[in-house]
Amino acid sequence: ADGKLLDTVATPDDAGRTLLMQAAESMRLTARGYHRVLRVARTLADLAGAETIARIHVAEALGYRRRAPVN
Protein backbone atom coordinates (compact mmCIF):
# COMPACT_ATOMS: atom_id res chain seq x y z
CA ALA A 1 0.00 0.00 0.00
CA ASP A 2 1.19 3.50 -0.66
CA GLY A 3 1.90 5.90 2.21
CA LYS A 4 -1.41 7.77 2.11
CA LEU A 5 -3.49 4.59 2.09
CA LEU A 6 -1.34 3.09 4.83
CA ASP A 7 -1.89 6.19 6.98
CA THR A 8 -5.66 5.69 6.75
CA VAL A 9 -5.77 1.94 7.45
CA ALA A 10 -2.84 1.72 9.86
CA THR A 11 -3.27 4.51 12.37
CA PRO A 12 -1.77 3.64 15.76
CA ASP A 13 -3.34 4.69 19.05
CA ASP A 14 -1.85 7.67 20.90
CA ALA A 15 0.75 5.61 22.79
CA GLY A 16 1.74 3.78 19.61
CA ARG A 17 2.01 7.01 17.66
CA THR A 18 4.18 8.57 20.37
CA LEU A 19 6.52 5.57 20.39
CA LEU A 20 6.72 5.52 16.61
CA MET A 21 7.52 9.24 16.43
CA GLN A 22 10.20 8.92 19.13
CA ALA A 23 11.72 5.94 17.35
CA ALA A 24 11.61 7.70 13.98
CA GLU A 25 13.65 10.52 15.46
CA SER A 26 16.10 8.47 17.53
CA MET A 27 16.60 5.77 14.87
CA ARG A 28 16.60 8.35 12.08
CA LEU A 29 13.98 6.46 10.10
CA THR A 30 13.36 7.53 6.54
CA ALA A 31 9.78 7.87 5.33
CA ARG A 32 10.18 4.42 3.79
CA GLY A 33 11.44 2.97 7.07
CA TYR A 34 8.63 4.65 9.00
CA HIS A 35 6.01 3.14 6.70
CA ARG A 36 7.65 -0.29 6.85
CA VAL A 37 7.43 -0.25 10.65
CA LEU A 38 3.81 0.89 10.41
CA ARG A 39 3.00 -1.89 7.91
CA VAL A 40 4.55 -4.57 10.16
CA ALA A 41 2.75 -3.14 13.20
CA ARG A 42 -0.58 -3.34 11.31
CA THR A 43 0.16 -6.98 10.43
CA LEU A 44 0.99 -7.79 14.06
CA ALA A 45 -2.24 -6.12 15.21
CA ASP A 46 -4.19 -8.12 12.62
CA LEU A 47 -2.60 -11.37 13.80
CA ALA A 48 -3.54 -10.48 17.38
CA GLY A 49 -7.12 -9.75 16.31
CA ALA A 50 -6.83 -6.11 17.37
CA GLU A 51 -8.86 -3.35 15.74
CA THR A 52 -6.18 -0.71 16.29
CA ILE A 53 -2.41 -0.68 16.36
CA ALA A 54 -1.33 -0.45 19.99
CA ARG A 55 2.02 0.52 21.47
CA ILE A 56 2.93 -3.17 21.88
CA HIS A 57 2.52 -3.76 18.13
CA VAL A 58 4.71 -0.77 17.27
CA ALA A 59 7.32 -1.88 19.81
CA GLU A 60 7.43 -5.39 18.36
CA ALA A 61 7.66 -4.05 14.80
CA LEU A 62 10.55 -1.80 15.82
CA GLY A 63 12.26 -4.81 17.38
CA TYR A 64 12.30 -6.56 14.02
CA ARG A 65 14.26 -3.76 12.34
CA ARG A 66 17.85 -4.58 11.55
CA ARG A 67 20.33 -2.54 13.49
CA ALA A 68 22.68 -0.31 11.52
CA PRO A 69 26.28 -1.52 11.71
CA VAL A 70 28.47 0.50 14.05
CA ASN A 71 31.85 1.46 12.62
Image: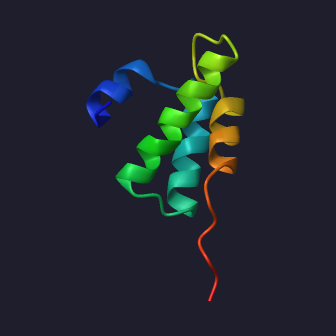
Q: Residue at x 57, y 62 (%)?
A: 26
Would residue 3 be found to the left or right of residue 28 on screen? left
Q: Is residue 45 above or below residue 64?
A: above
- Residue found at x 36% / y 28%: 6
Looking at the image, residue 23 lies above or below residue 26: above
The residue closer to the viewer here, 44 or 17, is 44
Q: Is 49 rendered above or below residue 70? A: above
Q: Residue furthest bottom?
A: 71
Q: Is residue 23 above or below residue 60?
A: below
Left-right relation of 54 to 30: right
Identify the colour scheme used: rainbow
State how many labels appear: 0
Percent coordinates x, y for residue 63 in the rendering = 69, 49
Position in image of residue 41 (x %, y %)? 58, 32
**Quarter of the figure that contains the C terminus:** bottom right
Which residue is rendered at x = 63% and y = 31% of the image?
15
Q: Tell me the quarter of the picture where residue 61 sits.
A: top right
